[in-house]
Image (cartoon, helix red, strand yellow):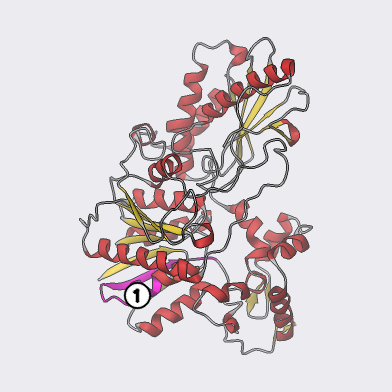
């Protein structure tokens, strides 16, 4: 076992070396899923607080490995609104695309862009046929690598391709390059708005006929 | 004498580091890796189970120095996407001759690509496909296609997975997205190719093997790979319309990004 001090100290900071061995022993026998379940009740602020805690010559992160800290790292990762690349993407690609979409459009159908913490939310209305729907498309901090998420605020009937919270199933589920249909090199957030328009047009057909008019995504 | 900066010292990244460090042309190596060596890593790594609990960077450093004590090895024990480490990462990239990407998550690959383009550095990327059925090695040069161009092209043109689509009749149901671990042999085969291409590019800036990406099949998979050990070479062009490196994305943004962004967001909040 390697430690910063070569594992020399038997007891430092009030925590003896046996504690370290017990923790590593538990890690040896626990699967990733076990660890996530055990630590899920610990809230993120607490995790962040614990990152600096030390047991002898070991930090908590060294003792517990990345299982415990993966979530808090995700939260701390560079994002759309706090990285140079993210800001440039917004200024040169996304915002001009929204402004082009809004140009000449009735004010009530324009996209409004609202900042919510580290996310951006596009608020807009669509009218694919006769009905007006209120929607929001959320650009998470990890956008555009992670696709935008669109939900309809107007109550809908339960139908195919609708996820929890009236979130639209627009992209093939999956997070890797192979299995996600979202292409961050080609699509802007306005593409998500257009995809939502198409989804709603399908919904209206389904509402009248019971048939979803487009084939399943593959 | 070259400085190599590598992100990722996992099962594939460690093979690349090992092979690069053995060559006299490499005099300095910087490793960016946040993880700790865990018991389940043992089967695909060089290190014994007794090393579990140690930082991967530290284990890698010791390994490389055993090979070549004169090597200069610098470790950054941080996540590539950690905002607090960006200044230090950029400083190190600025002094590097080549970048090596050995991570398996998309945000990190895109971020690495952005950093490499910012500092005009060539870089390479190795990717082992799920189940070890094959893998890619990509070369990126300043002015050439970015990772976004390559990923977009491959997404549209290359089938590397024939797993069934999710159950769209139950879109909220569990997603079958299990990544099947590759064998150490498969990882080593692709990582060795990755190291080979990196060394060639390091020794000759004009190195042109006739492809920007190469896919080597390692197993026969019906309707995906009909032949084993068959290379597919791709010469992928830079996309003019790429939203990462294309004309629109590289058009001059305002000098002060924060001010320009605040103004734009304010304008669109009241659209």
Image point (70%, 82%), residue name: A21
Q: Which residue is mark 1?
A: B21
Q: Read off the chain for label 1.
A: B
Q: Is residue B95 above or below residue B22?
A: above
Residue B28 colored magenta? yes
Tell me if B224 is positioned left or right of B2 in this view: right
Q: Nearer the viewer, residue A186 or A1?
A: A186
Image point (37%, 70%), residue name: B29
In the picture, the quarter occupied by the C terminus of chain B is: top right
- Count residues near mark 1 (Cα–Cα under 10 Å), then give few for <14, some for 14-19, many for 20+: many
Segment colored magenta? B17-34
Tell me if B269 is positioned left or right of B65 in this view: right
Residue B97 colored magenta? no
Q: Is residue B59 above or below residue A78?
A: below
Tell me if A43 is positioned left or right of B81 in this view: right
Q: Is residue B103 above or below residue B235?
A: below
């Amino acid at each position: 076992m390697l430690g910063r001090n070569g594992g020399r100290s038997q007891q430092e900071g009030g925590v003896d070396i046996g504690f370290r061995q017990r923790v590593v022993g538990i890690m040896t026998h626990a699967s990733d899923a076990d660890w996530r379940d055990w630590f899920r009740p610990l809230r993120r602020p607490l995790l962040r607080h614990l990152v600096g805690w030390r047991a002898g010559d070991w930090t908590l992160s060294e003792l517990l490995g990345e299982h415990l800290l993966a979530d808090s790292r995700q939260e701390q990762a560079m994002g759309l609104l706090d990285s140079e690349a993210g800001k440039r993407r917004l200024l040169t690609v996304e915002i001009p695309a929204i402004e082009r979409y809004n140009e000449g459009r009735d004010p009530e159908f324009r996209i409004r862009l609202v900042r919510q913490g580290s996310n951006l939310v596009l608020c807009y209305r669509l009218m694919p046929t006769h009905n007006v729907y209120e929607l929001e498309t959320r650009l998470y901090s990890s956008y555009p690598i992670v696709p935008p998420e669109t939900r309809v605020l107007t109550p809908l009937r339960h139908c195919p391709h609708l996820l929890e919270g009236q979130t639209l199933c627009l992209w093939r589920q999956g997070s890797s390059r192979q299995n996600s249909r979202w292409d961050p090199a080609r699509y802007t957030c306005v593409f998500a708005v257009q995809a939502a328009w198409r989804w709603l047009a399908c919904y209206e057909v389904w509402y009248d006929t019971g048939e979803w008019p487009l084939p399943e995504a593959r | 004498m070259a400085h190599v900066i590598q992100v990722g010292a996992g099962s594939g990244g460690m093979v690349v580091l090992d092979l690069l460090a053995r060559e006299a042309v490499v005099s300095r190596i910087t490793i960016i890796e946040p993880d700790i060596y865990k018991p389940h890593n043992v089967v695909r790594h060089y290190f014994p189970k007794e090393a579990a609990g140690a930082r991967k960077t530290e284990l890698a450093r010791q390994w490389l120095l055993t090979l070549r004590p004169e090597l200069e090895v610098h470790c950054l024990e941080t996540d590539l996407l950690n905002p607090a480490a960006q200044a230090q990462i950029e400083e190190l990239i600025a002094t590097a001759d080549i970048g090596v990407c050995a991570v398996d998550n998309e945000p990190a690959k895109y971020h690495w690509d952005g950093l490499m383009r910012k500092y005009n550095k060539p870089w390479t990327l190795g990717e082992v496909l799920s189940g070890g059925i094959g893998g890619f090695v990509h070369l990126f040069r300043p002015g050439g296609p970015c990772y976004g161009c390559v990923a977009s092209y491959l997404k549209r043109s290359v089938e590397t997975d024939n797993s069934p689509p999710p159950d769209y009749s139950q879109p909220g149901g569990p997603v079958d997205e299990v990544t099947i671990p590759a064998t150490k042999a498969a990882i080593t085969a692709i990582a060795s190719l990755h190291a080979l291409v990196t060394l060639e590019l390091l020794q000759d800036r004009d190195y042109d093997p006739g492809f920007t990406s190469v896919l080597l099949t390692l197993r026969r998979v019906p309707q995906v790979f009909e032949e084993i050990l068959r290379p597919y070479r791709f010469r992928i062009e830079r996309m003019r319309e790429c939203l990462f490196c294309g004309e629109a994305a590289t058009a001059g943004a305002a000098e002060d990004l924060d001010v320009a962004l605040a103004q734009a967001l304010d304008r669109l909040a009241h659209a």
